[in-house]
Image (cartoon, coloured by chain):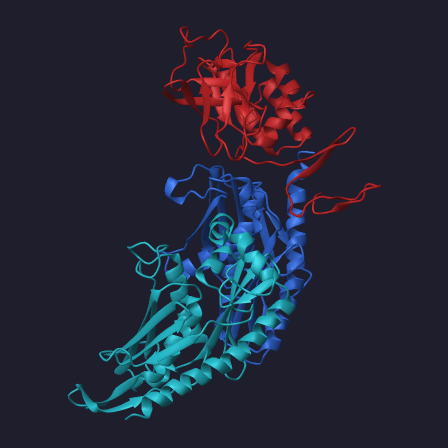
Chain colours: A blue, B cyan, C red
Amino acid sequence: MEVCGSSNPTLREFGSEQNLLSRPDGSSSFVQGDTSVLAGVYGPAEVKVSKEIYDRATLEVVIQTKVGLPSVKERAREQCVRETCEAALLSTLNPRSSLTLILQVVHDDGSLLACFLNAACMALMDAGLPMSCLFAGVTCAIDGDGRIIIDPSAVQEKESRALMTFAIDSKERRVMMSSTKGSFTVHELHQCVAISQKASDNIFEFYRESVRRRYSKSV
Amino acid sequence: MAAGFKTAEPLEYHRSFLKENCRPDGRELGEFRTTTLNIGSISTADGSALVKIGNTTVMCGIKAELANPAVEVPSRGYIVPNVDLPPLCSSRFRPGPPGEQAQAASQFIADVIESSEVIQTEDLCIVKGKLCWVLYCDIMCLDYDGNVLDACLIALLAALKNVRLPEVTFSEDSEVPKVSLENRRGLTIHKHPVGASFAVFDDSIMIVDPTAEEETLSTAIITVVMDEEKHLCALHKPGGTSLSGEKLQDCINRTTIRHKEVHKLINKVIQSVKTPE
Amino acid sequence: MPESITDSKPEKVVCGPGLRGILRHKQPNLYWIDSQQRRYVPSKGENVIGVVTAKSGDIFKVDIGGSEQASLSYLAFEGATKRNRPNVQVGDLVYSQLIVANKDMEPELVCIDSCGRANGLGVFGADGLLFKVSLGLVRRLLAPQSEIAKDLEKMFPFEMVVGMNGRVWVKAKTIQQTLIVANLLESCENMTAQQRQTLFRRVADGSI
């Protein structure tokens, strides 16, 4: 387990572990504050004929909640994670195969969608799937006084006026995915995007560091 | 020849148009399809609207029911939106339980209602802790030709404006609500959220109001929802290729114009419905 | 590390973006990125261990751990003719070479070299143990001067077949010894050279 005691006070402490499950082809856990997600990737594996796409891999994302059955909310999140991963993965290199990404909520204490994205990216990296870029998820909350809180906890999320989650790509730090709640001004949006882009640098640095450590043993 | 080209190389076909700053259906890149609106089309519903954006046709019906408020929030009613994409509207949808797209659309509409506070759920409360209204907003797509989210939002907003709720009196001792169907009143619409959808081609070219074909060929889709105070209610981009801040600003600017157009359209239709009476 | 721009004059080489593993280099100019995948993606010319899953007409279907089953013609064995079919049963292990492997086609295997000789390929493994390790470990085992294999050899004699698809088959004199080899190999995955040598020494001394 590696922990990034973040020098940037705005992000909660985050950490991750790769390759912790034996069955999946790639796995990771990602912890942001008290929010924790476990991810597993299978593939490229055999695909059902009905889901086969002739020129690229079929990606399926499944979100498992801590209790109860997945609802419409999880479906919407699955769509966000899937389309982000699809854009990052070079899925044309493995046509007619299936990739399955399973995200298990271990604990939800805010910024869950961002944590899903980070766990997903680490798991895809662990599986060694070809990708055109990496991505990092960052959540911003705007509280009643108009202050921007980055990586909010569940309590902060509840008290916030608006909530935005972005996926930032590693190449040009642009917005790959955006999902918002609550109303906010255009200026606030741009501020949040800029802050998320800055915060994503920490996450990308962490990605590099953890991969470097992982491979340091087999040099 | 053109038909063959279109079937064999749909992406190249579209690109050759985009290069000339136009689209296969003759529109410019930033041009919406003709939007038409009909209000009160379903007489049995408490409020309804039919929206057409080009070929995309969406119908929204609102049914009001009396219910007990939730214990945690005794002074609030409920709004329950549901988007249905039946097999009728396109061959891409199969019969059976709602698919991912329909569920994601339902969640999106629910999020917009909550974020924009188009209706305050407190207004739907009749007697605190005892009685409130539930608005079932069923949105059904009749013809799918892309950009359903925009159409759904217009249909929902117009239908909400069309709702006429009967007056309810609640006698404290008998605890039985009395509904007088003669006296009806409309809902207070606090905000008017209007959406605009964009499709991104080849990571750089942005087109507005994509058709179904453009949606499938594009690399990313983004929907911006804005109210009349120019506050954003949603910036929905479920993945796809990345966009810079400037591109987002372009989308927002276009949405501001679109908001005015749609707002004018809704008001005009409401006026025209009222005049004959 | 990838995602970095290597400035090797006169031309610029851009590697990445994305993080995968260690960038390795072999003279004069062969670069590759070493990673620890687990899923095998077939690639032409590699030797793999497959499991025969079905016989259908002229071909065997073989599971090699990729996204699709590979096909193996019954004529692709040493000395096989139309009348003299090789004795291959469903469930047999075959050590074979990929002659067709690209993303758009079904992979195809052979158990002979270009001269028609088996050259080590073919059905094997009457007993012994087959297990899976990461592709990174397999590559380390197959490296010409592999230290892991050398260290293991010192302990006791055993047979080993290593497939590029992450499958390893071992057989020693007793079942006990076979299991020791298998367990040691599996534990090599996440160990530095030093840790490995200590472990092997302790096993050789009989302290574990």
Looking at the figure, which quarter contains the C terminus of chain B? bottom left
Between B99 and A138, the one nearer to me in the picture: B99
Picture residue at 62% right of the left edge, 36% below the top: C35
Q: Is residue B216 left or right of residue A197?
A: left
Picture residue at 58% right of the left edge, 31% below the top: C135
Is residue C107 depicted above or below C117 in this figure?
below
Between A143 and A13, the one nearer to me in the picture: A143
Residue A30 visible here: no
Residue B6 visible here: yes
Is residue B138 depicted above or below A39 in this figure?
below
Between A117 and B42, the one nearer to me in the picture: B42
Which x, y percent locates residue B166? 24, 87
Which x, y percent locates residue B158? 37, 80
Please give the count of numbered marks on the rendered protein: 0
Q: Residue furthest right?
A: C10
Is residue A144 depicted above or below B9 in this figure?
below
Which x, y percent locates residue B52? 38, 72
Picture residue at 57% right of the left edge, 48% below the top: A122
Which x, y percent locates residue C119? 57, 11
Is residue A85 depicted above or below B224 in this figure?
above
Between C33 and A142, the one nearer to me in the picture: C33
Q: Residue furthest front?
A: B1
